[in-house]
Image: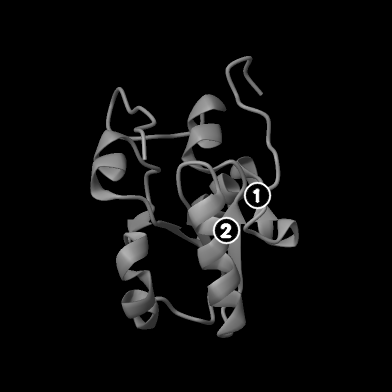
Amino acid sequence: MTDSAPPLLPSAFADPALDLMPDDVRDRLAAGTIVLVDVREQHEWDAGRVPGAVHHEIERIASRAPLLDAAVPVAFMCRGGVRAGMVATAFRAIGYDAYNVRGGFTHWHAEGLPTEPAGAVVAEH
């Protein structure tokens, strides 16, 4: 972890048992064993994102659930883990093997994990 990475505190709105560490998600995404869904707002996505992630803003995620294969594990990401944690919990309740990327894009970015576009930043929510 770099000096600039924020501490990884659990979210009061998510079940910590559903958290996956960013490097684990990176490895599973590269192996094709998980789908990463970014639920942040469009301006956040445009400022920086994880290569290979799909984007479904939180306001639309319920209507887009049928687009996600319930047989494939899915990890949700937001800026810090609160929004994605709530989404992961909701998706678990309807039968998905759903997870939250602990620390969200903020931690992913601070860890120096792959991002795009060049010069990606963590946008304010």
In the depicted structure, whether residue 64 falls above or below residue 49: below
Q: Which of marks 2 and 1 precedes in the sequence? A: 1
Which residue is disc 2 drawn over? 85
Residue at 38%, 76% in the rendered image: 62
Quarter of the image with the N terminus in it: top right
Contact? badges 1 and 2 (CB < 8 Å): yes
- x then y, percent, for residue 71: 54, 81
- x then y, percent, for residue 4: 58, 17
69 and 14: which is toward the camera = 14
Residue at 35%, 27% in the rendered image: 121
User: The residue under label 2 is which amino acid type?
Assistant: Gly
In the depicted structure, whether residue 44 falls above or below residue 71: above
Which residue is disc 1 drawn over? 11
- x then y, percent, for residue 31: 54, 56
Q: Can residue 10 be seen in this view?
A: yes
Cα gap from disc 1 to disc 2, whole angstroms: 7 Å
The image quadrant that residue 19 belongs to is bottom right
